[in-house]
Amino acid sequence: MRPILAALFSWLLLIPAAHALESPAGRVLLTVTGDIATTNVGDEAHFDREMLLAMPQHETVTSTPWHEGVVHFTGPLGRGLLAAVDAQGNTLRITALNDYSANVPVADLHDHDVILAMTLDGEPLRVRDHGPIFVIYPFDDSPQLLNEEVLTRSVWQVHRIDVAAD
Ligand SMILES: Nc1nc2c(c(=O)[nH]1)N[C@H]1C(S)=C(S)[C@@H](COP(=O)(O)O)O[C@H]1N2
Ligand SMILES: [Mo]
C-alpha cells in the first residue's frame, strides 16, 4: 500500500478505538458524569477495578500529611482518565463515599502528575486506608502543593467525578 493510504487506513482504525469504553464486569468503583463524550452506561462512564488497572499506571513516591514517611502509590493519571472519557470541561467535582466533595481544576491534572491512587506500598487501598481511590498530588516533587487549597482537593474514598464547564 502507498504510505499515504496506509496512514489513512490506520487512522480510520484508530478512531473507533479512541471512543470505545468496555462495560464493567465487576463492582463499579468510579462513576464519571457530566461533559464526557465516551460513556458505557447511558450518559455516564462506569469503571470497575480491572478497567482502572488496565489504564497506564503511574507511580508516585512522596510524603503526605496522612502517612508516616515516604510512601509509594500507583494508579492511573488523572489526565489519563479524562482522556479515556473524552472529558471537555474545566472543573471536576470529585465526590467521596462520605459525600465530601471538592472542585479540582482540570489544569491541575495537566500541570502535575496527579493520580487516582489505588495502591499504597503495593497493596490495594482499602476504604479504611482512604481507598478505594485517593487523589494524590506529587507533594515531594512540588512542595508548593502542600497548601490548604490543594489539601482540600486531595479527596480520598473517591467514587464519583462530575466534569463541568467551570
Ligand atoms: N473523602 C474525604 N476527603 C477529604 C476530606 C474529607 O472530609 N473526606 N477532607 C479534605 C480536606 S478539607 C483536607 S484539608 C484534607 C486533609 O484533611 P484532614 O486534615 O482531615 O486529614 O483532606 C481532604 N480530603
Ligand atoms: Mo481542609
Image (tube, rainbow, N blue to C red):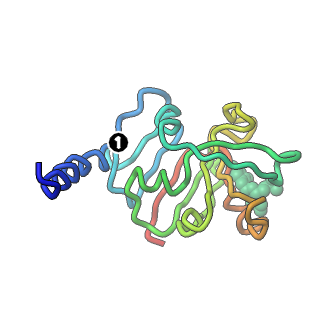
Q: Position of residue 117 (x, y in %)?
A: 64, 45
Q: Position of residue 18 (x, y in %)?
A: 31, 49
Asked if 29 appears above or below 32 in the picture, the reply is above
Q: Amino acid at mark 1?
A: Leu
Residue farthest to the right, as pictured: 68
Asked if 107 appears above or below 75 in the picture, the reply is below
The answer to which image quadrant residue 128 occupies is top right
Front in this rendered view, residue 69 or 159: 69
Front in this rendered view, residue 145 or 161: 145
Residue farthest to the front, as pictured: 2
Picture quadrant of ligand 1:
bottom right
Q: Position of residue 121 (x, y in %)?
A: 75, 36
**Residue at point 56% right, 43% down?**
57
Secondary structure, mark 1, is loop
In the shown orientation, is residue 112 left or right of residue 72? left
**Residue at point 72% right, 42% down?**
130
Count of number-bearing discs: 1
Asked if 6 appears above or below 22 in the picture, the reply is below
In the shown orientation, is residue 151 left or right of residue 22? right
Disc 1 C-beta below 8 A from ligand 1 = no
In the shown orientation, is residue 13 left or right of residue 62? left
Disc 1: which residue: 21
Label 1 crowd (10 A; few <14 / some 14-19 / many >=20): some
Q: Position of residue 20 (x, y in %)?
A: 30, 44
**Residue at point 43% right, 41% down?**
46
**Residue at point 48% right, 72% down?**
166
In the shown orientation, is residue 106 left or right of residue 12? right
